[in-house]
Image: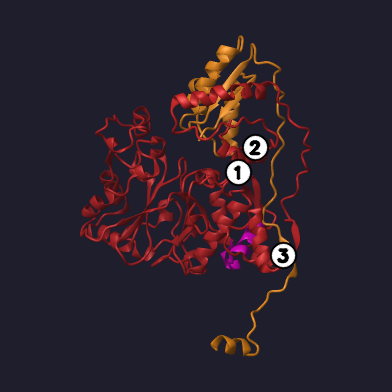
Chain colours: A orange, B red
Amino acid sequence: MCMTAFLAVPGLVVAKENPQQWTLVNPAGVVLSKPVKIVERPSTLEGKTVVLRWNGKPNGDVFLNRVAELLNEKVKDVKVVKAWEVAPETNIISYSPDKSVVVAKKLVSLKPDIVIGAPAD
Amino acid sequence: MPTTEFIGLAKDTSVGDGAPDMSFVNIPHPVAGISAQDLRAKADRLFPELLSAATSWKPSNTTIPLQKSPYPAEVINFTGTVSDINNFFLSKGWALGVPIVPPTPERVVAMLKGTTRKPGEVLGQVLPRMGAVTVETVATHAVMAGCKPEYMPALIATIEAMLTPEANWGAINTTTGTVGWLIVFNGPVVKDIGIAWSSGASGKMHHANASIGYAVNLISAAVGGSTPPKSDKSSFGGPADYVAWVLGENESKLPKDWEPLHVSRGFKKGDSVVTVYGAYPPVDLTDHWSMTAEDSFDAFSSLATPRIDSGGACRPEKAVNDYFVILGPEHAELAQKANMNKEQYRKAFWEKARQPISWYPKACVNMPKIEQFYGIKATPGTLLPITDKPERINFMVGGGAGRHSLFFTPFWGTNAASKKIDN
């Protein structure tokens, strides 16, 4: 009876929001980045220098140590450089593009033909 | 070589760094916390793929699109209801799952009247997406969060502080940790825009605190791309992902001769200053019993420990990061009764808040690094302080009645950053 009375009361309708045209400002912001040219891969790792880079997260070094073993075992005349041993200052999470450049420059100074990074986590 | 759970973040970072096309070899997650034998097995299985990526991979001929200007922002024509706008923004990662105010150009223009800064000024870029945040972007998010125009100078300064290297915004945006922002205001701005500083200051019902705390997180998501699960890797997330911890210092309850936080950090008393700090959720230093400061240090020392944030013996690098203590007024009163100035209190707190290295998980204790970062000779029985020196612990007074204080610990590599608030 109460429900019937409720429905019978004039003017008590559920308000409906009608679609309308909106103009909205895109909140995402433009990505500002300078394109980076990716160096071509060597056709083989034989005789090449491979730098392995660890960022200090647990077990990344353990994984890369095995990668180093496999490279030495299976790739002729490869030179494997463990960056975390010869340049421990690279053994960090960079957290910013500026710091990344510093780390990258140090890795470049090790004269790699290729760098393999294991961010782990 | 990211793990499978982190490939999304790795790709986003790569795009932000200007290399949308990068060679990845995915390691099945996890790498941490598994045996060396299992890890070696993963390396063995992936090795052929690694060799192929190292020699055969070629970048695709993706055309890099022309760089758009960061200002003015694009406008979007949309047909729908306010609910539809909210659903659309959420689907794009521009909202957090609670309502936003639609940012119409008129509302953004009205918000920009709250500042004299030029709308096209680029304040910086937010990791990991590297989206540019302009003054207009701040105004857009201020609209979405329901801020008033008079909050704009405070919000702009907050974003500028978050963009400093010390604040480590990119890390806060992407970590697996349960971290968020602590934002503290000092000086005339507290009264000018109604920042709450007393009872319940960082809780509900305070418009300035809540809307500023909401706006910074909207910017983190939309501009920085910090959305779960792809780039925001927080294992749990948390309420501070929606609204940051925002409060003013309760300068009226500072013990005699204690300088306010911003003065401790090098500003003048009359300056309006914001201090930001990327932190884990705080520990409530509840102590209803101590009648003296000395006794309260006893109570605090069991709770105020870097063990809760994997610092201390596990990550000795954090010994050189900032920590934060917000003393409730009733605890601050104990310092007043003891006639301790801020430096004396800080030193006494730091001396007492120590725990044996043997209390830390054996798997993480790194004695050489403890000795390096703390500058001490260490054994398992050594009582380790929070930081290498007491000055790294920031003290302030906040909140209202009740025998509670808060202890905030930093995300790894994070320090507090302060900025003067101009117009």
The mark found on residue B14 in the picture is: 2
Q: Residue at x 69, y 37 (%)?
A: B18
Quadrant of the rendering where the C terminus of chain B is positioned: bottom right
Taking B389 as reference, is A102 left or right? Answer: right
Q: State the residue lying farthest toward the top.
A: A77
Where in the figure is residue B50, as x and y percent of width and height? 62, 24
- Mark 2 packing: few (<14 Cα in 10 Å), some, or many (20+)? some
The residue identified by callout 1 is B128
Q: What is the C-alpha distance between the residues marked 2 and 3?
A: 32 Å
Q: Chain of mark 1?
A: B
Q: What's the magenta region?
A: B137-152
Q: Residue at x 34, y 29 (%)?
A: B367
Q: Earlier in the sequence, mark 2 or mark 3?
A: 2
Q: Earlier in the sequence, mark 3 or mark 1?
A: 3
- Mark 3 packing: few (<14 Cα in 10 Å), some, or many (20+)? some
Indicate the amino acid at tag 1: Pro
The residue identified by callout 3 is B105
Indicate the amino acid at tag 3: Pro
Q: Is residue B188 magenta?
A: no
Q: Chain of mark 2?
A: B
Quadrant of the rendering where the N terminus of chain B is positioned: top right
Where in the figure is residue A88, as x and y percent of width and height? 48, 25
Indicate the amino acid at tag 2: Ser
Q: Main secondary structure of the magenta part?
A: helix
